Amino acid sequence: MKKYENKKVTVLGLSERTGIAVTEKLIEIKAQVMVSDIKKSDQLKPQLAILKKHDNIKYDLGGHSEKILDSDLIVLSPGVPPNLDILCRAEKLGIEIISEIELAYRLTDANIIGITGTNGKTTVTSLAGHLLKENLDNKVRVAGNIGSPLIAEINGMEKNDWLVAELSSFQLEKIKYFKPEISVFINFAPDHLDRHITGQNYWKAKKRIFENQSKKDKAIINIDDNFLREKIADIKAELYKVTNKYEIDRGVYFDQEKISLFKEGKQEPIIETKDIPLVGTHNILNTAFAVLLAKIFNIKNDNIRQAVISYQAFAHRLEIIYDQEYRIIDDSKATNPHAAVNALRSLDAPIILIVGGQDRQADFSNLAYTIRERVHKVIIMGETKYKIKHALQQVGCNNFEIVKNMQAAVRSSLIDIKKGYTVLLSPACPSWDMYESYKKRGKDFQKEVKRYL
């Protein structure tokens, strides 16, 4: 901690979660802190109100000025791209630039389980955290991209405690020494191309989760993902596999009936899939990851089963909000096409789909084919409405309607609904064209559904 005392540290990006948490931690360890953000003070009122109690913070608002170049260290909030001109200049001057999770790693003695992938991170992280909290004597905290920043959860954590962290490409992009004792990689599909530009750049950021691991560490990989399976040889950590296709020496195998552990050539059934409370076939895969993590900690099968059964899924992730003569499901967390495809493949047709949101240069072609196969009617909204419309027309799907807002989308989805149908909000896009978060979008969907019903 003392190595940061009196060091000049700039926090770049005053986000409500990470920016504030990093700033307050740096104040706590007696660094000289400056906060820089492209937004002006009147756009940052909630954050500035929280930090008002600290009278020793310097501010550089309304743009990133050359004051940043007087720093000993720069800590980036996840939303700040690392290729800003001021950051390139800082690197040339030898100023260290790191992410929030890197700083947290340097400041904690706790062990870390790092969970990444394109989809399913939140479910695996929260379920794994639940399993470990229910069954370990040491402290277990869930953090990262899922809720509290990692930096906000490290106080009071000791060397035998565990941090279960959901990690995004943005967080991994600027690590240096960060190393999870156990890394988990669920799946890979190009995403966030507005930031990373190419799928290869996205992969370079994501694969850093393995970068500092050694043979003493563990890595859990979905070998059914063709892309990940080809990368196994590059992993130095002890490898555990998750599959429903291949024979494995160490890991878990799952099918529609059960999840089983494979160890030293022996198969051991752990839990039947009928006992998994989560909706969707892809959640069998997500549960398999959490079960494998539990078995690495030698948790008993009965305890695993009871913890899985008692788990409550996060809101807005295939959350059933009405289930009588027809079903209504809130999957607002599906912020990319791959997640929406997973949702569609997990549900029985006929489906009425509400889709669309912020344009992040995603490819909607695979989603369009899946819609053609499984969706009765498509309701499109948001910035991507014409891109999705074009993708649907390209595959010969013309049963769609473009609407202006969520109220119109819900009205259109329910006006002629029949028994046995499913209305699914699975936008395949981020929410920021219309809402400040996917949670706000999901809440608005649920409000409009309740009002209509």
Image (cartoon, helix red, strand yellow):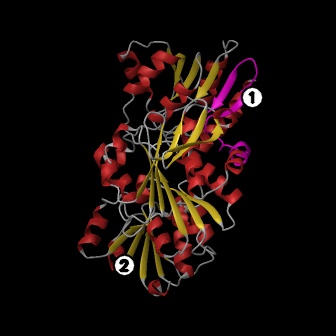
- Neighbourhood count class around disc 2 (C-alpha, 10 Å): few under 14, some 14–19, many 20 upward: many
Q: Is 325 left or right of 407, judged from the image as shown?
A: right
Is residue 320 in the magenta section? yes
Three-letter amino acid code at the position of disc 2: Ser
Q: Residue 134, position in %: x, y?
A: 71, 57
**Residue at the spot 59% in from the left edge and 59% down from the top edge:** 297
Element type at mark 2:
loop
Q: Secondary structure at mark 1?
A: helix
CB contact under 8 Å: marks 1 and 2 = no
x, y percentage for residue 328?
A: 67, 26
Magenta residues span 306-332
Quarter of the figure that contains the C terminus = top right
Residue drawn at (58%, 59%) of the image: 143
- Based on the picture, tell me whether residue 360 belongs to the magenta stretch: no
Q: Amino acid at mark 1?
A: Arg
Per the model, the C-alpha gap separating discs 1 and 2 is: 53 Å
Res 393 visible:
yes
> Circle 1 is placed at which residue position?
451
Residue 277: tell me if it is visible: no
The image quadrant that residue 11 belongs to is bottom left
- For the residue pair 449 and 407, the one nearer the viewer reads as 449
Residue farthest toward the front in the current orientation of the protein = 265
Which residue occupies 39% across, 72% down? 74
The answer to which of marks 1 and 2 sits earlier in the sequence is: 2
Q: Which residue is mark 2?
A: 71
